[in-house]
Amino acid sequence: MKKIKMRNFIKISILTCITLASLSTPSTLLADSHPGYSYESNIGYQNPSWMSKIEDSTKLSEISIPGTHGTMALHG
């Protein structure tokens, strides 16, 4: 009887792991189709003098630079 309970426990554990893995996967698989993501190398917008609008006394911790997280992943 203990063998049957142990086998059932193992089967349920494996099924639970598979279910949890399959439920967590789709959100990461579809992440690149979200409109908030862009993997284009050229988005058709250039602003080479953007830093000229920032005061020289501005600390780096006081500004937010968008697009820097994955920059080195693509171009580093």
Image (cartoon, rainbow, N blue to C red):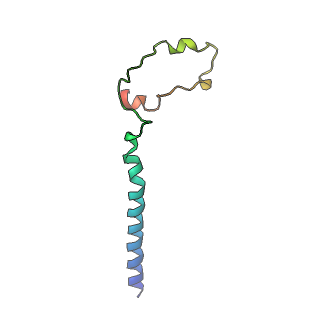
- Furthest-bottom residue in this view: 1
- Furthest-left residue in this view: 41
Question: Along the horizontal axis of the image, is 59 left or right of 70?
Answer: right
x 39%, y 32%: residue = 38
Q: Position of residue 52 (x, y in %)?
A: 54, 11
| Towards the viewer: 76 or 51 | 51
x 61%, y 26%: residue = 61
| Towards the viewer: 9 or 50 | 50
Question: Along the horizontal axis of the image, is 26 left or right of 56?
Answer: left
x 42%, y 70%: residue = 13
Q: Splitting the image into 4 quarters, where does residue 14 fall?
A: bottom left
Question: Along the horizontal axis of the image, is 74 left or right of 59?
Answer: left
Q: Position of residue 34 (x, y in %)?
A: 41, 40
- Furthest-front residue in this view: 35
Marker count (numbered): 0
Which image quarter is the C terminus in?
top left
Q: Position of residue 69 (x, y in %)?
A: 47, 32
x 59%, y 24%: residue = 63
Q: Splitting the image into 4 quarters, where does residue 36 fall?
A: top left
Residue 6, compared with residue 23, is above or below; it is below
Q: Splitting the image into 4 quarters, where does residue 32 fall?
A: top left
| Towards the viewer: 11 or 20 | 20
Residue 38, compared with residue 9, is above or below; it is above
Question: Along the horizontal axis of the image, is 29 left or right of 36?
Answer: left
Which image quarter is the N terminus in?
bottom left
| Towards the viewer: 31 or 15 | 31
Residue 10, compared with residue 74, is above or below; it is below
Residue 29, compared with residue 51, is above or below; it is below
